[in-house]
Amino acid sequence: MDALGSVLNGPRAMDAFLLRVVMTPPWSIRVEDQAPLTVVVAVSGTATIAFDDGEQATVDPGDVAIIRGPDPYTYGDGTSPVTAIIDEGQHCVSVDGAELIDAMRLGIRSWGNSADGESVSLVGTYGVAGEVSTRLLNALPRLIILRDNSSPLIDLLATEILRDAPGQDVMLDRLLDLVLIDSLRSWFATTESSGSNWIAAESDPVVGRALTLIHNNPQHPWTVAGLATQCAVSRAVLAKRFTELVGESPMAYLTEWRLSMAADLIAGGDRTLDAVAAQVGYGGAYALSAAFKRVRGISPRDYRRSLAG
C-alpha cells in the first residue's frame, strides 16, 4: 500500500450522522458540534459555509465540501441570521433553545424547514476520528471545496440515504467512507495539496520507498540503517532526505505511525495490549505503554477508558 493509501485507510465511519437537509430561505444553521470531519454534498440550490474569522465559500449543485473541525461555522443561504444551532451529539435547537429535531423532521433521514425546499444537501459527520486519521486531518485545510464532483458514489449516497432497509446504517457508513476517500483522492491530486509533506515525499524514489516499508510493515524492527539498505542508499543520505521531505526523522515518523496504529486498535476494544504491541512493533504491553504515555501523555488503558466514557 502506498503512503496516501495507508493514510486514507484511516476513515471508518461507525454509526455516522447522515442527513438529507432540505431548506428554503431564510435559513442559517450554526454548527458547533466539534466533529473532526464533515462531508457536505450540495444537491440543489446554493449555500454558504462561513467561519467566524471571515473565511467562507459557496457550494453549488454537484459540489462537495469537506470541513475539518473543530471550529464552529454557519451553513445557510448566506444572508439570513442563524435559525438553528447544532451542538455536540448533533443536538439541534433554535436560537432561543427550543428543540428542533422532531419539529423539522421531514421523513427518513430528512430534516429541514420545507419538504420542497430549493436547497438540498447531504451531510455526513464523523463523530470520532480514528487516531490513524490524525496525520490525514493535520494535512487538510479547514475547508475543501471540490467543484462539480460527478462521482457515481454521490448519486448512490443520495438514493441510499432515503432508504430504510436491513443493514442500512452499515451501508451508509461505508458509502460515506467511499465518498470521502474518493473526494480526498481528487483533492490530493491538485496543486492545492502540495503543502502536505508526506504526500510530496511519496513521489521521491528513496523516501517514498521508506514510507511504504514503514506503512506496510510497522511490526518490523526497523532502524535507519535497515531502511537505508532496503532503499539502496547510505544511512546518512536516507536520514537527511527523509527529514528534509517529511519534516521529521525516519525513527520519529515510525514511532508516530506505530502509536497511531496502536491507538486505532485500542479504540477497537477487542485486542489485548500484548496483541496490539505485537502488531505495531513493540516487544510487549509494557514497552507499548511506556512509548504511548511518553509521546501521548496517557497510558493505553486510560486511553481506552476515555473512549468508553
Image (cartoon, rainbow, N blue to C red):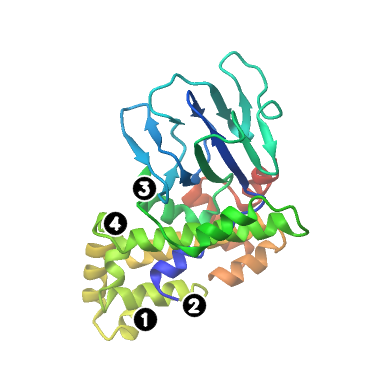
Between discs 2 and 1, the one toward the N terminus: 2
Query: Between residues 257 and 289, which one lies in front from this camera angle?
Result: 257
Q: Would you say residue 10 is visible in this rendering?
A: no
- Marks 1/3: CA distance? 38 Å
Q: Residues within 10 Å of mark 4 (few under 14, many from 20)?
A: some
- Residue 127, quarter of the rendered image: top right
**Circle number at residue 193:** 4
Identify residue for label 1. 226
Q: Is residue 74 left or right of residue 168?
A: left
- Residue 104, quarter of the rendered image: top right
Identified by mark 1, the residue type is Gly
**Residue mark closest to the camera, 3 vs 2:** 3
**Circle number at residue 71:** none
Of all residues, the one furthest to the right in this rendering is: 166
Identify residue for label 2. 220
**Residue mark closest to the camera, 1 vs 3:** 3
The C terminus lies in which quarter of the figure?
Answer: top right
- Establish if 197 lies above or below 42: below
The x, y position of residue 5, in whole percent, is 44, 69
The x, y position of residue 82, in whole percent, is 48, 21
Between discs 2 and 4, the one toward the N terminus: 4
Between discs 3 and 2, the one toward the N terminus: 3
Identify the residue shown where x is 55% and y is 69%.
280
